[in-house]
Image (tube, coloured by chain):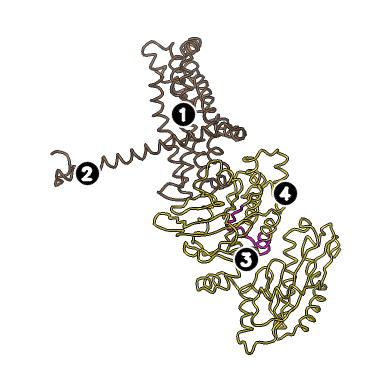
Amino acid sequence: MGIGRPGIGLGERRSLVLRFFAAVGRRVLVMLGDFGAIFIFFVISLGGIFSRKQLTEMAWQLYYVSATSTGIVILVGLFTGMVLGLQLFYTLVQFGSANVLGTAVALSLVRELGPVLTAVMVAARAGSGMAAEIGILRISEQIDALDTMGIDPVRYLVSPRLAASVIGMPILTAFFDLVGIIGGYLTGVLLLGADAGAYFYRVQSSVTFEDVRGGFIKAIVFGVTVSMICCFEGYFCHMRTESSGAKNVGLATRAAVVLSCTMILVSDYVVTSFLT
Amino acid sequence: MKGMAKNPLIEFRNVTKRFGEKTVLDRVNLKIYENEITTIIGKSGTGKTVLLKHIIGLLQPDEGVILFVGKPLAEMTRGGWREYKRHISYLFQHNALFDSMTLFENVALPLVQTTSLSKEEIEAKVMSRIEQTELTDDKDKYPAELSGGMQKRAALARALVTDPGIVLFDEPTTGQDPIRKNVILSMIAQYRRRFGFTAVLISHDIPDVFFISDRVVLLWEGTVGFEGTYEELTRLRHPMLVEFLNSLEGLQDEMTGLLSKEGFRSCYASVFSDEALAPETSAILFTVEFDLPEETLRPEARAEVMKTIGEHTAHHFRPLGGFSARRVLGEILTILPHTKIREAEQLMDNYAGELKEQAVIALENVEELKRGTGHPFEVRIKGGASEVSFKDDIDQIAGKTGASQRVVATLTFDGRGIGQ
């Protein structure tokens, strides 16, 4: 009887608990429905990739998703590597294992931090742009216009973005990993005095093909996740009930970035469990 | 009634559409016939755009069925639907141009994405449409750099670039100045004659839109209040129609300075308000014909010529108690109360003599005529007079006067430019 406000009877408490679980259940059902819809959206978009007319648009999207994100990915990769170099050096020194710094930095980056942080950066930079752009096309009837012209809007708008994300994400991840390892070298070796030869020897000997493959699989999964969530949110922004018009585009963009980042971490766990 | 014997191309049967609690279309029955221009009129918010979006498949009815050549749209196969979409085009009320593409890219988009034409063929087709809509100098601009009127014309060019069999126009003249409104309506009529498409038009440009319409549909609070020809619409003096027409139509035709159709009918009715005291009345029907290929003179310049002639006609006959209105494109009907047929013929000749002197001076302001078209051409004004009795309706008068028409004036342009 210790829980609950004084004066609230057993029946009322039970009713509150039921209402709480009903609300949670409704939310979960909505989320499951949304994930189902995103999966169908993915299947339809995948079917639209294999069209000759898509090549130009795919090239543009690849440029937009990858090339224009390279700078920020390199910057974040460099500082991530530098922080890893600092943190791991001081930790490993305590155990007399400073010579395995290269292994720790490289494996952390290639297996986890590279794909995850690259995907978060792409979600924030390109993914928000996808959601906003498609959302504006929706509210200004340009998606309807495509439909009336006999152009499949999903094929024309979503498929190239999906393809660009799937191709671009592993490339960006590779950049991130490479620059991160250099960052670790800058702090661990040049700043703190770890052995340069040992650092690169450990990087080379400890990173296996399976690690690189795993990182790339994650990058591809994150590419699909980010592009699908962002395109889906933008494409159906007019269905949102909270508001209408431009405000819906803003809400869709926000939801796209938040959901993408969350799903990157959730799918990271799922993929890691399958890979290990 | 025109078209009733034919099978409809598109038919709405008891179509109902609701958005939440609101019923926008309520058991709508409607027929659209091939090669006709059907104009949908009605107050804002009565479901005109919703109706049009049902035809193109952007919306599906909650109840009822839409038939295309007798087959329900909902039962079409994927291939059939694709084929249907290929023959239908839609001009959006707010244009729906792609902001990130230039005007040229916007117009080319449907050809690039849905046809296997070569780059050169696409360019030729697109440039032809851009030239027809007078946007050649702006082809590399983005929609944001164009005025509202230019955006509308760009959207029109895009809608017509695939040579569609059915074109749905959602307020094609909104945001245009009076001359361009008429140019766009003329263009729709010309294209219909040239390519033979079926058009469904939403417009508030009354009476101009009636000059090109074969059928008129009045949508009233989600239901079809009237369906038929414009003549039937005006004969059927239902209070709903009167309220609607009065709410939309002024007495002046802003294009020519002539009376609007409603104003003209009202004046005509007042002449014969008392049968016993009805004066001896005559009518003159003027027809303006351009003797040159359509491509030589832009629709805008043609509209300027028509405007000049219209203003001259109104100015000439008003002091004599006459009143005039456009009947169809290129035709002006003048009623002269207290005038015998012989006097009317004399007045017609005087009008023609004056027109030759004054119209050419007025036309000096038309940039294209001033600059020169490069080709000699003539504008022929035919006139015919007839007596009018109180039993005659306006169609009968036009028929009688049309039969006695002869060329009363010819404006000759040598193509070098006026005043040069």
- Residue located beneath label 1 in the image: A222
* C-alpha gap between disc 3 and disc 1: 58 Å
Report the chain holding disc 1.
A
Which of B201 and A36 lies nearest the eye of the viewer? B201
The crowd level at tag 4 (other Cα within 10 Å; few <14, some 14-19, many 20+) is some
Instruction: Name the element at disc 4.
Output: helix
Residue position for label 4: B128
Task: Give the image location of residue B70, x and y in percent.
Answer: 54, 52
Q: Which chain is yellow?
A: B
Task: Give amino acid for label 1.
Answer: Phe
Residue B370, position in %: x, y?
A: 81, 62
Task: Please report, as a chain letter, where disc 4 is located.
Answer: B
Question: What residue span does the magenta drawing correspond to?
Answer: B166-185
Q: Are marks 2 and 3 on the same chain?
A: no
The answer to the question of whether label 2 and label 3 lie on touching residues, with beta carbons closer than 8 A, is no
**Residue at 65 percent of width and 87 percent of height:** B278
Quadrant position of the C terminus of chain B in the picture? bottom right
Secondary structure beneath dot 2 equals helix
Chain for numbered disc 3: B
At x 48% / y 59%, what residue is drawn?
B28
